[in-house]
Amino acid sequence: MTTPVVVVESSDRIVVRQLNEEYISALLKSDVVWYSEHLAEDFVCITSEGAARDKAQFLGDVAAGPNFNDYELHDVQVRFYGHASLVQARGVFTRKDGSPGESRYTDVYVKTDHGWRVVSAQITPVRSVRSL
């Protein structure tokens, strides 16, 4: 098992946490410009349905607008591995049809000469778990 790098500039932690919040805000606002500036050119998103979307496809999805009215972040964890950062969180939302939803996601950021860029995102829906 890989041990996270312990020494992290506090400014990097602040920046990645802020980018995570902006990521969600940009999604709610269909802010294609924000994503164009912050996603790596080879960005890939694995959607909650299991589809792989490249940057261009993802930007098209963003432009079409979200399928939910609101989104709340919970349990945000940010870890660093050298020049990479892993953000994991849980989102609670209300779909356009009024039904509730919940998902967990993992986003991978890489520090470049141009700042932190998102290189990967994966969304997993949370389903009700039956007790055994």
Image: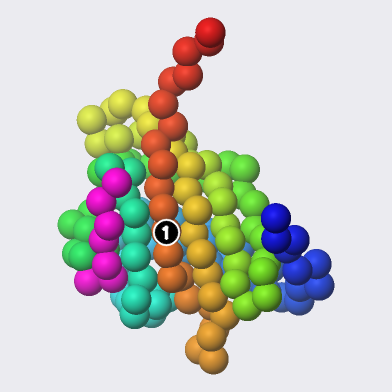
Amino acid type for the residue under numbered disc 1? Ala
Image position of 129 (left or right of 5): left
The quarter of the image holding the N terminus is bottom right
Q: Can residue 62 be seen in this view?
A: no
Which residue carries the number 1 mark? 121
Residue at point 60%, 67% (across, down)? 85
| 11 versus 30 height, above or below | below
Q: Can residue 81 be seen in this view?
A: yes
Image position of 60 (left or right of 38): left
- Mark 1: which secondary structure? strand
Please state the horizontal and vertical placement of residue 16, each as a whole percent of the image: 60, 68
> Where is residue 6, by image quadrant?
bottom right
Image position of 25 (left or right of 13): left
Residue at point 21%, 65% (across, down)? 57
Please state the horizontal and vertical placement of residue 68, each as a whole percent of the image: 31, 41
Magenta residues, start to end: 50-56
Whether the magenta-drawn stretch holds residue 54 is answered as: yes
Out of 106 and 68, give the one closest to the viewer: 106
